[in-house]
Structure formats: C-alpha cells, structure tokens
Amino acid sequence: MKLWILAFTLLPLLGTVYVCWHIFRIVPLSPAGKLGCAVLFGLGLVMMILSFVFDIDALPFNVAVTMYQGGASWIFWLLYAVLIFLVLDLGRLFKAVPNVFLTDSWSGTLTVLGVMLVIFIYGNIHYYNKERVELTVRTGKPLPKPLKIVMASDLHLGYVNRKAEFQRWLDMIYMEKPDLVLIAGDIVDGSHHAVRVQRMEQMFSQLDCPVYACLGNHEYLRGVDNSIKLYRDAGIQLLRDDVAHPLGINIIGRDDDSNKGRRPLEELAFRCDPARFTILLDHQPYRLEEAQKAGIDFQFSGHTHYGQMWPLNWITDAIFEDAFGPYQKGNTQYYVSSGLGIWGSPFRVGTRSEFVVLTLLPR
C-alpha cells in the first residue's frame, strides 16, 4: 500500500514539476505566458487529485465523466511528457539536440505537442479496436460436445466505458454464439453509481447463455457488498470461492486476492470431479504454481492490463510470472488477458484490448 501511495502522490508531483519547468523554458512566450502554460498543465494534477479524493458521483453525470476521465488521462499525459523531455534532455547531454531547440523555441514546442498528439490519437483509436483472440484446447477428458467459451476480464464499466461502448462489446460477444461466457473480475471501474445510473447491469441479459464470473480487486475497492449485489442484479452467476458444473465441465471461481482469508485452491479443487475438464477463474495471476499443484486444466486471469501503456508493461513483466498471453506449467495451461476494457482513460499504446474465444475439443 505504501508503494501505491508513493506512486500516486510523490511521483506525479515530481513529474509535474519537471514538465512544468520544461514548459516554462521551451514555450516562446512572455514570462506571464510561460507561467500560464505551466500552470495550465499543473492543473491536471489538481484534477486527478479531486477526481479520486472527492465523491464525484454527486456531480451531474457528464461533469463526473469529464472529471474522472480527465484526471485519470492526465496521469498518462504526464508519463509521456516526462518521457519526451527525458529523451530531449539526454539528446542535449550528448550533443544530439541543440540547446536552442529546448529554449524559447516554436519548433521545439510544436514538436513536443505534435508527438503527444500523435501518441494519444493513436492510443485512443487502438483502444477501441477490440481484438478477438482464438484459442483451441484439446482434452482427453470427456465432453458432451465441443464447447465454445468467450472469456473476458477487466471490463471497467462506468464513467469511461459507458453504455454505448458496452453495447458494442455485447454485440461482439453475442455474435460468437458461445455456450458460456466467463468473466475474470473487475466489471466495475470507479463507481457502482456510474454503472447503475446507466442501467448497465441490465444489459448482461442480452447474452443468450450462462455467464459466470469471479470478483476482481476493483469490486473490493468500490465496496464488495455493493459489487456482489451488482453481479446478482446483472444475472451473473458469481463464483466467490465456489464451484459450478455446467455443460459437463468444472468451473472454479476464486475470491479475489484482496480477501486474504479466501479458501485454498486445493480445497475448491477437491469439490470438482477430476474426470471433468476444470477451468479456474482467478482475477490476479499470482502464484500460478497453485493451479498446477491442484490439477487445474486451464486458468484464466486478468488484472495486469499488460501495463495498459508502454513502457508500463515492462513493470508488469517484472512483477508477474505471466503478465500477458498464453503460458503453461506442467499440464496446466494459462491465459492472462490484457482486458477488454481499461482503467481510467481510453488509451492503449503497446498493448491491446481483447476478448478470448476458447474452443474446447476432445482429443
């Protein structure tokens, strides 16, 4: 927790000071104009703090959308502004960038603005391009028929991923004609209110098949009791340290790792018929060896977003044994999804938004 406090307070503050200093130097305006530009950028830090500290649910919906999305987006604008100025500073240090390019320079100012604009226009377009990932798994265990299962994680519905966008996702999933839909947590983003006011929980009924899910950490951050009620009202069969047996397979849904008192996986696996194919839903992909030891056939997780924006995926690669994509330990196969939705702001650079179509076939 202390690391998160550091990440979301001290680091943004230091980054803001660094960028504002560069803005004051590079913009070819009067001292008052330079100061105005720097202050304008610094106000993003204020918006971020306000959007996370205060109850924006009390605001008119469109105002809350602007506050939340603006504050969350600013974190990524700050990240890329810092990276751009770091590159320019290194270039100046090694005599590759002339000092005049960073001092009272229209060419420098317009170059930085242009690079930022290209990055975030691309990132926004790329985010809305949802990728369909096909997986085929063959099993020697008996199946009543070949099964088509759509799996998704990290929907993060609310102020950023709103009703119209969610409808587009539902249409894509519906067109797959799946036998089952599995969701590996984090349906909610920043607010239950934002989901309720748009009646998004009612939209899950459009999926003409059973929907199973486990909880994610955002369900705990926003109040687990309200989250459980939201899942129930959505008609989702929530597996919270529980097991289901649809269509001749086992599905285990673990409570999120936020609950340090959740049941051991081996205890849940003991409730499964080992002759049946077993899928585990576990939001956070820690301790992957537990699934292997418990004899799980396939684990589906999310949570990482694969960093969401490059180069943050370098951090997730360092933290997780498998931060993204397919993986295997012994006879257990894994897939860690980068998520269908996104946290905070609709941008992806160096990562993708996806849903997985798993075809389960007899060997």
Image: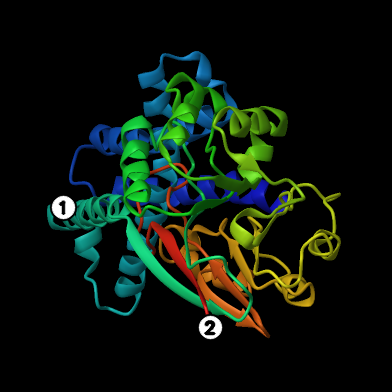
User: Which residue extends farthest left?
Assistant: 107
Specify which label sits upstream in the sequence, 2 or 1: 1
Q: Position of residue 184 (x, y in %)?
A: 58, 53
Figure check: 359 above or below 72: below
Q: Where is residue 58 in the image (x, y as percent from the top left)?
A: 51, 14
The Cα–Cα distance between marks 2 and 1, rounded to whole angstroms, is: 59 Å
Q: At 46% across and 15% down in the image, what residue appears?
A: 59
Number of on-image labels:
2
Residue bearing mark 1: 110
Q: Tell me the amino acid under the disc marked 1.
A: Leu
Q: Can residue 350 be seen in this view?
A: no
Q: Which of 295 and 57 is in front in this view?
A: 295
Q: Is residue 12 visible?
A: yes
Circle 2 packing at 10 Å, graded few (<14), some (14-19), many (20+), is few
Circle 1 packing at 10 Å, graded few (<14), some (14-19), many (20+), is few
Figure check: 145 above or below 25: below
Give the SS element for disc 1: helix
User: Which residue extends farthest front?
Assistant: 144
For this view, does 103 lie left or right of residue 150?
left
Frontmost of labels 2 and 1 is 2
Q: Which of 264 and 267 is in front in this view?
A: 267
For this view, does 307 lie left or right of residue 120?
right
Q: Position of residue 103 (x, y in %)?
A: 23, 56
Confirm or deny contact between disc 2 and disc 1 (CB under 8 A).
no
Q: Which of 3 and 304 is in front in this view?
A: 304
Q: Nearer the viewer, residue 363 or 284?
A: 363
For this view, does 19 lie left or right of residue 227?
left
Q: At 47% across and 55% down in the image, what residue appears?
A: 339
Q: Where is residue 55 in the image (x, y as percent from the top left)?
A: 56, 21
Give the SS element for disc 2: loop
Residue bearing mark 2: 363
